Image (cartoon, helix red, strand yellow):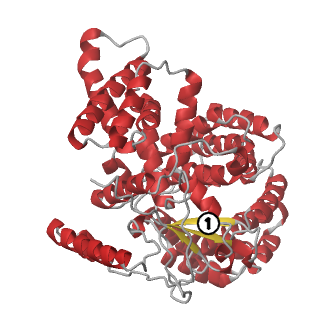
Amino acid sequence: MPRYAALIYGAEETDANTSPEVWAQIMDEYNDFGARAGAAGVLGGGEALQETTTATTVHVTGGAKGGEVVTTDGPFAETKEVLGGFYLLDCANLDEALNWAAQIPGAWHGRVEVRPVIDFSQEQ
Amino acid sequence: MIRHEGGRVLATLVRLTGNITLAEDAVQDAVLDALRRWPIDGVPDKPAAWLTTAARHRALDVLRREAKRTAKETDSRLLDEVTSAVQEETSDSMVRDDVLRLLFTCCHPALSFEAQTALALRTLCGMSTAEIAAVFLVPESTMGQRISRAKKKISSAHIPYRIPADHELPDRLRSVTAVIHAVVTAGHHASDGSLDARPDLADEGVRLARMLHELMPDESECTGLLALSLAVDARRSARLNAAGELILMADQDRSRWRHEEIAEAVAMLDHAVHLRRPGPYQVQAAIACLHGLASTFADTDWPQIAILYATLERFTPTPVVRVNRSVAVAEAHGATAGLALLDELDVATVDRWHLYWSTRGELLVRVGRRDDAVVAFNRAIECSPNDSDRRFLVGRRDELTSECGKPA
């Protein structure tokens, strides 16, 4: 059966100003979707990402494997390149994650943005 | 004393709690406690150990309260760890590693350069947000946001609190030395207003460079950076006249240079060179030391400095290095040779840079192209970033135009 990635976009500025009540409603909506899609057996997985201020972008220079690894603070911002895929990396810390990210071919063919996943068990 | 001990105490607390904000609050409380009690009880034998113990207890209180409030598994696990560590004897080598961890965390490449610098000044130099904001000419609220965003990224993205492995060290040290070099440079060149507006920052830069050298004595570039910082700092008090205007090195009163600081720079450079791993900071330190050792401007070893700039340009091929090299080459081999080096530059890369135009102007004067020189000085004045430089350049241009018998 074909598989699909559903990529969720939203304006971040409005997130910060969203009231707890509205947030709770949004979470209910997501929980509802998760329950229904899960029951239907179509859900292969999914995560919520932390805000873009926690993002780090990795690029390997020279357009080929083995170039210099350049790490920058912030999300990937170019408009010419498009999202081509993703990996979920289970790592002990950001250094480990960046090290793996720099080995993804996309790091030299384009950029790889590394963003931490929200751990809801740690959220207050 | 407390301010600088504070950095070491903070480093240990960050390791114990894994949280910079909690560690900062705990150290802050311990310092307040010390300010209250030491005048009455006397300063303890080991002030840093006293502060560390007080801060640990303080952090423990906060963690206990948090664990009770949230009943989260992670909070109670952290509480257990800090409780068992609270009686730990902190040896000098442990403190050394703690400070290094904090330095590498603050200067992590996943943080912006501005954030790295601000965090280093805040955590290791004990500067307040307001002081750092004043130094970088941004509103305090902007700097506060920058620092809290960086701290949030460290915790949310799990930037580790560790000393990088040997194979990562060259890359990671580059960000640490760049931050310290920026602090030293910012201490000597205000981007606005008058020069030398931030002597405190110059002191902190030298202190950070010294700290890094003591932490990593076998890293030649760390020692080179300390030598460079000392040699540049030694000339600090001779760089401005009473009116706060820039004095060119040729015209500086060399008796006001701090010669013991120059001697220390030379000793440090000697130490670095013996490690046999050359690098751009060592080359810049060698140039600064040669200037420092010349008893008059005319005595300066320009041929050697010209060679060193050519070496530096191989490490860092930037227009800044090229312009400095052209000055040394002009002194060593004549203005025509210096101008030839400037002519090779792509003008687009230096068009907005006042020092390129003023250097070009000076060399044009020397080869007798006065009209071209006036054009170059006018461009330098347009691009000048601060009043002190602008006054100097206007004076220089007016000298030229009056010599030519033309109106300014």
Front-lying residue, B164 or B346: B164
Residue B296 visible to the viewer: no
Front-lying residue, B251 or B288: B288
Mark 1 burial class by Cα count in 10 Å: few <14, some 14-19, many 20+: many
How far across and down, in percent of the image, does residue B383 sit? 51, 76
Above/below status of B301 relative to B407: above
| Residue farthest toward the left in the current orientation of the protein | A21
Q: Is residue B293 left or right of residue B123?
A: right
Q: Is residue B141 left or right of residue A105?
A: left
Above/below status of B407 relative to B204: below
Q: Quadrant of residue B357?
A: bottom right
Q: Quadrant of residue B377?
A: bottom right
Above/below status of A39 relative to B266: below
Dot 1: what SS? helix
Q: Please, what is the three-letter code of the amino acid marked with disc 1?
A: Ala
Front-lying residue, A18 or A22: A22
How far across and down, in percent of the image, does residue A92 sit? 54, 51
Above/below status of B389 relative to B184: below
The residue at 43%/37% (across/down) is B14
Residue B224 visible to the viewer: yes
Residue at the spot of label 1:
A101
The subunit letter for the residue under badge 1 reads: A
Q: Is residue B118 left or right of residue A94?
A: left
How far across and down, in percent of the image, does residue B138 sit? 35, 61
